[in-house]
Image (cartoon, grey):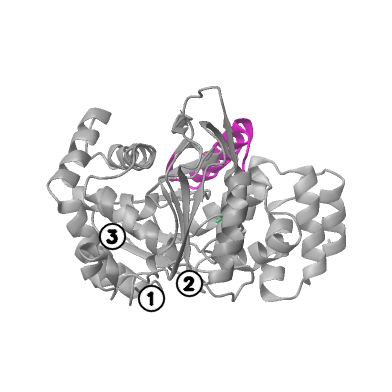
Amino acid sequence: MTTYEIILKKRNGKQLTKSEIEYLVSGYTQGTIPDYQFSAFLMAVFFQGMSFGEITALTEAMIRTGKIFDLSDITGFKIDKHSTGGVGDKVSLILAPLVAACGGINVPMVSGRGLGHTGGTLDKLESIPGFRTDLTENEFKKQLKKIGVAMMGQTKELAPADKKIYALRDITATVDSIPLIAASIMSKKLAEGIDGLVLDVKTGSGAFMRELNDANKLAKVMIEIGKRMGKIVVALITSMEQPLGNMIGNSIEVIESIECLKGNGPKDLMEVSIALSEEMLLMGNIVKTKEQARQLLANAINSGIALEKFRQLIKYQEGDERVIDNYNILPQAKYRIEVKSHKSGYIQKIDTLAMGLLSVELGCGRRTIDGKIDDSAGFILKKKIGDYIKKSELLVEVVGQDKNKVKTVSKKILSAYKIGKEKVKPPRSILQRM
Ligand code: URA
């Protein structure tokens, strides 16, 4: 079949074979299939969907464009966590050292940069002076063996098809497609050479899957792909109805993560971090029950070993580990504007997509592939859904290096908040386990 015929077949709602999918993915990655034809294929998938078999074939084909890390000489379970993306989602920075500190599980984490309105773990880590995320496979393995945790960016060898396809999806309105998201995430994660994966599938106003039903479908698909490829996969569906924690940005999210490891984390962020960490400990057979997991995690925080693990991780990756005790080492914002409430009432809704987009406008994320990030920029949220606020009371602090951006963005913040007379409950953090 020609590329044209395969596109036509998908456009007409037919199932593609494994070899047709392989042909398209390898051809596009090698450059023999042009952007315009692969875009048409992506759009056909967006409208026609894919069967489990097709999504698995797509994932496998994407993995085969690169290599799979061989972590077989590392003893103990290798378990990673992946989030589908959110605003203020700094869970990886907390969970990776926390789980590794409990012992018995290795956490090989390959993370991404900010995508669209969502923040990226790599951008947050790189706000720590000196921190290297460009580890080689050897460095990654060596570090895992030594300290049980390593966090790096996608290399050229790890599912290179995903990088190329993702960039194309980003500009052809084909990001929010369940088969494409599932294959993108699972190809990267399964190429890490892990035994198991805990997924944090986000839903709500700041998630790619706004509806619970869609998040549920996405989770099911990723679990099924994992199963077909012999991996244990568990998913939690968690809320992105409001930003997670109180900080949105890069260096300020690092501060909030360190505070979590010191035992001072905000409730919603700790709930999600602990729930996902529990799943990792259960999956690795480190504990038998959730209660035991909870206890072990609490001990790791209270005794300070989780914080020490984060210090060790920063040091191994050449970051300035003094940041743990001195936040002034991080890039500091020059400008700060206080956004105050225009009326009294309860915070009823936060448009989290809008907050994410505003954070990008402020400089927390990139607007172009090679755009520059302002590590110091961000929002410090003083009130969340369910809180009462008085007229003229502080709602959000906007910080950053660029005076104009801080000014412009701070003027737009209020429109993301719905404040009303009726009291509302804060959204539940964990919605489902699958
Ligand atoms: N995260 C990914 O890695 N890929 C997607 O397609 C969406 C979120």
Q: Is residue 346 left or right of residue 96?
A: right
Residue designated by label 1? 136
**Pointer 3: residues within 10 angstroms few (<14), some, or many (20+)?**
many
Instruction: Identify the image quadrant of residue 277.
Output: top left
Q: Is residue 377 above or below residue 210?
A: below
Would you say residue 96 is visible in this rendering?
Answer: no
**The N terminus lies in which quarter of the figure?**
bottom right
| Residue 401 tag number | 2
| Residue 13 tag number | none
Residue designated by label 3? 149
- Total numbered badges shown on the rendered structure: 3
Element marked by disc 2: loop
Instruction: Identify the image quadrant of residue 136.
Output: bottom left
**Residue 434 rendering spot, x and y as whole percentages:** 47, 31
Amino acid carrying mark 2 in the image: Gln
Most foreground residue, 66 or 254: 254
At horizontal 69% and vertical 41% (from top left) the residue drawn is 51
- Nearer the observer: mark 1 or 2; the answer is 2
Q: Is residue 67 above or below residue 208?
A: below
Q: Are marks 1 and 2 in contact (CB under 8 Å)?
A: no
**Residue 6 rendering spot, x and y as whole percentages:** 82, 57
Stretch of the chain drawn in magenta: 208-234
Q: Are marks 3 and 2 in contact (CB under 8 Å)?
A: no
- N-terminal label among 1 and 3: 1
Q: Is residue 321 left or right of residue 255?
A: left
Instruction: Identify the image quadrant of residue 296.
Output: top left
Q: Is residue 49 above or below residue 3?
A: above
